[in-house]
Image (tube, rainbow, N blue to C red):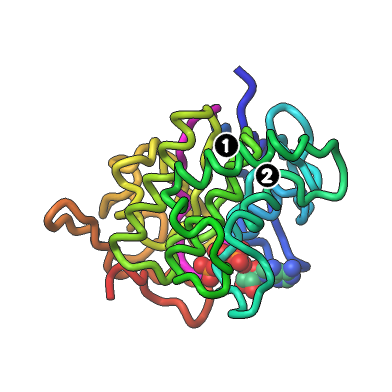
């Protein structure tokens, strides 16, 4: 089966600074992979590579069998959250529709079919009640559900979500994680989910890619999220504690990580 995302011998550098190297990763269709790591480890940059916005220093990257390129409509993208301006002149349904025909190239769907598809996805994310509301007036959690809806409305082969849970409360974080999970079950899209807290996605993640200090580990959550593996990865003591079904990661300052990020946020 052609992987939804394939990185082979991939290295990424900005000038002299290498973020990670030797990354081999096949993400299978329908797979849910959580990407974790300290601030500045290169998680967002990994998504930029898949989006064709950032060239690799070495190695190759393919999306559903073709080299990564900008504007690939087979990718749904949830960018890092920014609150929408209160006066944004779009209704909720317009924002979602941009995921269908907001691209400059490609055929437009006939409007009735497009509208039906937008309605279906609005219902799937539980946003029907505010489908016609101005987006700027909606809460952060409601806007985030719409961004997720926008990312899946075009039936992508690959969904890339960059910290989609940022600033969401526990309830909304759980809801947004579940939405992406349900979407991959429904459509077979693979999900690459960047998050600083693994807990909301623990029920869904098939694998974890953990980046730290230029190195990485890939494996099941159990294989990666334990004290021995993370201590080895960071090269300094890390403790992974389990409490009430949640994981707490304490410690873990890798020497080459961002100077302002010495601890995992989930430990605070
Ligand atoms: N276009 C660029 N040119 C130069 N440096 C960059 C560029 N984009 C990102 N960086 C740097 O590369 C490092 C990794 O950035 P990236 O956003 O990928 O990290 P991240 O793991 O997503 O971090 P965070 O958890 O803080 O969002 C950072 O130090 C960042 O400043």
Quarter containing the C terminus: bottom left
* 87 versus 98 height, above or below: below
In the rendered image, residue 41 lying in the magenta stretch gets the answer: yes
The one nearer the camera, 130 or 11, is: 130
Q: CA distance from mark 1 to mark 2?
A: 9 Å
Q: Residue at x 62, y 33 (%)?
A: 157
Question: What residue is pinned by disc 1?
Answer: 25
The residue lying furthest to the top in this view is 1
Residue 99: x percent and y percent? 68, 48
Q: Is 233 displayed left or right of 96 in the figure?
A: left
Q: Residue at x 21, y 55 (%)?
A: 246
- Secondary structure of the residue carrying tag 2 is strand
Which of the 4 image quadrants contains residue 16?
Answer: bottom right
What number of labels is visible? 2
Q: Evaluate whether residue 40 shows in this view.
A: no
Question: What residue is pinned by disc 2?
Answer: 10
Q: Is 189 displayed left or right of 165 in the figure?
A: right
- Which residues are drawn in magenta? 28-42
Q: Residue at x 61, y 37 (%)?
A: 116
């Amino acid at each position: 089966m052609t992987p939804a995302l394939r990185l082979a011998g991939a290295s990424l550098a900005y000038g002299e600074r290498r973020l990670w190297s030797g990354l081999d990763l096949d993400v299978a269709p329908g797979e849910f992979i959580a990407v974790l790591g300290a601030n500045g480890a290169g998680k967002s940059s990994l998504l930029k590579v898949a989006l064709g916005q950032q060239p690799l220093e070495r190695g190759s990257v393919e999306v559903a069998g073709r080299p990564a390129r900008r504007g690939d409509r087979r990718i749904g993208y949830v960018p890092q959250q920014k609150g929408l301006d209160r006066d944004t002149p779009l209704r909720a349904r317009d924002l979602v529709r941009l995921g269908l025909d907001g691209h400059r190239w490609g055929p437009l769907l006939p409007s009735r079919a497009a509208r039906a598809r937008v309605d279906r996805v609005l219902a799937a994310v539980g946003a029907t009640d505010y489908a016609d509301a101005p987006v700027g007036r909606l809460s952060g959690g409601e806007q985030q559900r719409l961004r997720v809806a926008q990312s899946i409305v075009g039936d992508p082969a690959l969904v890339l979500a960059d910290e989609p849970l940022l600033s969401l409360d526990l309830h909304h974080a759980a809801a947004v994680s579940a939405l992406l999970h349900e979407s991959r079950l429904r459509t077979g899209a693979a999900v690459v989910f960047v998050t600083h807290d693994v807990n909301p996605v623990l029920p869904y993640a098939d694998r974890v890619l953990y980046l730290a200090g230029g190195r990485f580990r890939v494996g099941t959550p159990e294989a990666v999220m334990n004290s021995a593996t993370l201590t080895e990865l960071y090269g300094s003591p890390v403790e992974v504690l389990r409490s009430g079904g949640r994981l707490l990661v304490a410690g873990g300052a890798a020497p080459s990580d961002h100077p302002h990020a010495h601890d995992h946020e989930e430990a605070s």
